[in-house]
Image: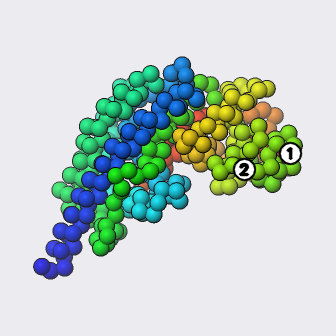
Amino acid sequence: MTAQPHYIIFNIYALNQFFSTWYTAMAYATTQAGLAVDGIVQDVDPNKKASGLKEEILTALIAGFAFLAGPEAAVVGQAAAAGAKVLVTALQQAPGVVKALWPQGTTDTQNWQMANLKDTLGSLDKEIRGRINAALQLVMTDPPTFLDFAANGQFSMPSPPSLDEQTANLDEALKTYLLSKALDANGYDVLLQIGQNRQHYHSQAQAGCNFYTSTGICNGDSGIWHSNNSNADYILAPKGGTADNSQAVTITKNAFEKGYSSGRALFDAAATCNGLWDTPREAWKDGLTTFQPYPRPEGVQLFSVSRTGIDFSCLSQLTVFLQAYNP
């Protein structure tokens, strides 16, 4: 057998195996997300107010691999992170496969309600399988798509990429989406202050912050989460503010400690989705007399892939309010 047919046959085998392991891992992720629902309801949404489109549940579930290739790569293991990065690259090169996974113009208009969310998750297996199969069929039957998807050469490696059956954190995209919807439905926003650093709070007795926990939250009663990525400080708070923010602080700590989301996925991403970083940073130093709202733009996709990158910031549905910092 010459080199070219061998290359094609090996890639066909590797691609089939990868999609098969991805689907299997998705089944596990759906189950894990279902197990987290009770905790999110108990901690954030006891009255089960949250709701949304069923299509958004599917989007968030299938987009879970993006988290493995991004902020969570350090904690999911090398094999899972490597497999997810290969998938991200392949999708950037083959936009037709993106459309098969997230078809436009056929949005499922059914709603999900927090009260019956477990049933909704339990019924998604057929739809997830259908979308992954549609993507694989396109890769296998359309030569240009096959060449684009496999162009990076990763499926030709002696040990081609795969996802373990019980890949951790594949459900974090969905959990972040559900948590943010529950927080929004129960009257919570995010307050953000630019320009501080961790050392600043070490000297603030009122914040009681002399160290940060493993999840990045100030150990005191403030509930501050500091982002090294954006040099911003975030605080979850009831809409309109309140003198007693203890419940919001407890919710933040529980959400991060129980693994429902992370500060980067919930807070930094919301600021990105809401367009806050489009404001020149110099303008933030001009003191604001009131908080400036940055609500989530209407009609923005939860998740998108293009040749220039991957954007999953709008999986966090929170509204961000900016407070300028004047040192």
Q: Residue at x 34, y 68 (%)?
A: 154
Q: Which residue is mark 2?
A: 212
Task: Tell me where residue 137 appears, x and y as whole percent.
Answer: 21, 52
Q: Residue 43 in the image: state x and y as whole percent.
A: 58, 29
Q: Is residue 255 above or below residue 66?
A: above
Q: Kindly identify the amino acid type of the residue bearing the numbered disc 2.
A: Tyr
Task: Classify 10 Å Cα crowding around label 2: few (below 14), some (14-19), many (20 and above).
Answer: some
Q: Position of residue 235 (x, y in %)?
A: 70, 38
175 sits to left or right of 87: right
Which residue of the protein is positioned furthest toward the top in this rendering?
47
Q: Residue at x 74, y 34 (%)?
A: 291
Residue located beneath label 1 in the image = 204
Of callouts 1 and 2, the N-terminal one: 1
Name the residue nearer the viewer: 209 or 6.
Answer: 209
Helix, strand or loop at disc 2? loop
Q: Is residue 67 visible?
A: yes
